[in-house]
Amino acid sequence: MSRHIVATVDEIAPGSSKLVTVKGREIAVFNVKGEFFALFNRCPHEGAPLCKGQVVSLVESDEPGTYRMSRQGELLRCPWHGWEFDIRTGQSYCDPANTWVRKFAVAVEPGERLAKGPYVAETFPVSVEQDYLVIEM
Amino acid sequence: MSTNTLERSAVAAKPKLSLVDCDIHPNLKSEAELFPFMERRWVEHAQQFGPNNHQGLAYTLQHPRFQPAVSRADAWPPGGGPPGSDLDFLRSHHLDAHGIAHGLLMLLRPTGCDERNLDFAAALCAAANDWQRECWVKPEPRLHGGIMIPQEDPAAAVKEIERCARTGGFAQVNFPPRALEPPGRRRYWSIYEAAVHHGFPVGLHVGGVPGHPTTGAGMPTYYLQEHHSNMPGMQAVVSSFVFEGVFERLPELRIVLIEGGFAWSPALCWRMDRAWRLMRAEVPQVPRPPSEYVRDHVYYTTQPIEEPDDPAHLGEIIDWIGHERIMFSTDYPHWDFDDPRYAFRTKLTEAQRAAIFGGNARALYRLP
Amino acid sequence: MRLPLAGGIDCDVHIAPPSMRALLPHLDAYWREQMVNRGLDRVDFTLASARPRLPIAARPDSRGNGGELDTLRARLLDPLQLRTAICHALHGAIALHTEDMAAALCRAVNDWVAAEWLDREPRLRGSILLPLQNVELAVAEIERRAADQRFVQVLALAMVDQPLGRRHYWPVWAAAERHGLPLAIHAGSLFRHAPSATGWPSFHVEDHVLQAQAFDAQLASLIAEGAFQKFAALKVVLLESGLTWLPTFIWRMNKIWRGLRAEVPWVKQPPGDIIRDRVRVTLQPVDAPDDPQVLARTLDHIGAERMLLFSSDWPHWHDDRPDPIPDGVPDALARRMLLDNPAETYPRLSLPAARATEAAR
């Protein structure tokens, strides 16, 4: 296990994502209303790059012909077959028990603390003025 | 369905197979891309009148789709244009990335097959064929065209098959599963005779807008149903070819059912055989049990592959059909794409894998 | 013909639709005079999908010399030692475009079934023939007949004007659910449009083969429209649908639902789960090969333990094998389809014949 600095907090606006590579693995980092989540960038179904998927709301229905929206921006639709995943947990909406995207712990750390290490900064220098996203892997 | 995390890294999953993809969709950047291949009279017709077909909506599909351009969200070419419209991007994003040695082209729009004006239909088909050859097949020898034909004018269709056989670049004749009449009906036989004469299989890719509903029960309400209806529609294709006696009449004819799946085939054959045993007096043109014709004449592309909870169930289906009739396809760039690395969850032997991912298609289409 | 146990329930028995003359006593004054004056008393509205002369329409042993009921008793009810047989008469009234005439004839057919069959043979149960051409008239017929507990289901054809899941029909399914009547869908078409996605086929044998696909489309419709959510107690019975097409249907619908769920968010379970819970399928015709192993495997693919209902499909002839339950059906499943599954499907079957008859009075 090592910790990897993958982005500054400012880089990923709420509702957007960034694709990063850690130890040769592609990881999609999402900002959901100020919270950050990191998912393996491969759909568990056929391997589609999840970072290209649409971030959507949860649609439910109490009765045919009615549509109830909630959790805006908290679900991810696979860019190929449209399977929905909960960005917070990586779980498939239709089959949460058996189908999930691997999730990685992501933490926000102030640059001041990171400067002391031991962290792996993959692509950019760390400045003490900024906050960073750190993935443990 | 037990689908856990795909843990294999991108590097380890690099394709080794030199495979054949039996369903790739090239796309026009715009309708005008066809104009250089059309006489002025038809360019003007296209611009002034446009298509005349049998559905409520013009210029789009009757059941609104769920993905922009019906496509994978990652398949939009970086240089612009709709998915499937950029040969360079198709090469890097699909052919090279998946180790595809041969790809069968399947142009979906515009097609002459739904056009009621038969002369315009013929002009559209000829232009689409020249466009495939000049813009795709000549610059990229891995790709092979499918001959578009105005099937409701069989004489014109036969002429177009002959013309394309002369120019080269084509591997099969395309015929819509949903034509004006079931595909086995006599009016279409000369088309199949021409295909056999020139050594082309007849490929039937789901689709067609003939004016009647997509199911025997009526028009579906939702895209979910409409997408599903492709599968029973393919079964009606098979029963029509069988009971009209087309296979009996043309022993060399081979048909390829594209994008209709395949798991339904054994059950259809059992049902046809039972019905034939009791009602064969009605169809003297069918002297053998229907399942025998299906086994000899019908090929299936795999996408969108059936995914039972227990993958072994699909293995049993493949055994019942015979793996030598099943040919891998991706449907690139469409949204229900199958990835050659992950689409098959069922266990295959090496020989089965080699046949399904390339060998069967190479033999059928006589590919190098 | 024999069955592994006595006291079973046969869920698909055909009785030949009555002649118009037989229906005249069951029509009101207006329709009786109309039928006679227009010469329609000599026209039997025969459903094109139920032509009695087709080879599959009648087993060789079903054409007896006595009355039809006697033949049914002697050739089916007695030898199979059936406790109950659920019957229906597929009358061409349901194909008419004239709604009021259709409703009048459906009323007459249902009353004729009660008088000529159910009153005379306590082992029989009936199906309410619905004039689905008009939703209000169909509801009215359910309300009129439902008090007679011997009618255990409502009956529709597999190919009518619109897919059966559409909201258009919901008042009818609401009435059926309210009265504990499953919706039975029987093979057949009104030919309002082509019976397949490819258009109009040439041969009767194709029509027969294509029926399975109509059931496929009806299940897709009922699921996608949310009919199973809306009518939580409604069961759907497929009569003469075949069953070996079901695995592919389930696999494909489950897959596509995962991608398109947001289009139909009321569908909250995989379609295959909904079907196993709410749809029942009659056995005949067993569209499987002779190899019992293959049938056994296919039943396993379906997960059919609770779904299958025994049916002889009398007097239809789909099968040249002698026994109505073919090899390959495990003993436990045979027992379930003869006894438990029908009992779970049809709330009205639990009533003993005497009480059901009493309720009809």
Image (cartoon, rainbow, N blue to C red):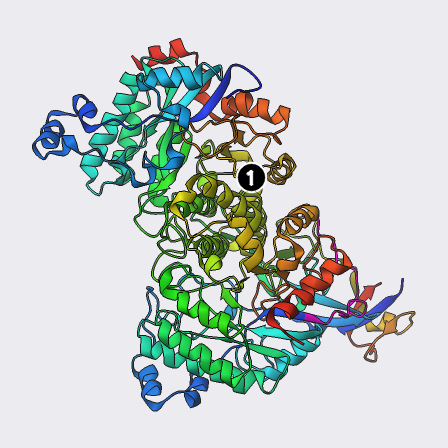
Q: Chain of mark 1?
A: C
Where in the figure is residue A66, as x and y percent of width and height?
Answer: 44, 49
Q: Is residue C318 above or below residue A26?
A: above
What's drawn in magenta, residue-wise? B1-19
- In the image, residue B189 lies in the stretch drawn in magenta: no
Q: Which structural element holds mark 1?
A: loop
**Residue B86 quadrant:** bottom right
Q: Is residue B57 above or below residue B280?
A: below
Residue at horizontal 63%, vertical 69%?
Answer: B21
Q: Which residue is mark 1?
A: C288
Q: Is residue C292 visible?
A: yes
Quarter containing the C terminus of chain C: top left
- In the image, residue B4 lies in the stretch drawn in magenta: yes
Look at label 1 and name its amino acid.
Ala
Figure label count? 1
Where in the figure is residue B240, as x and y percent of width and height?
Answer: 43, 55
User: Which is the main secondary structure of the residues drawn in magenta?
Assistant: loop
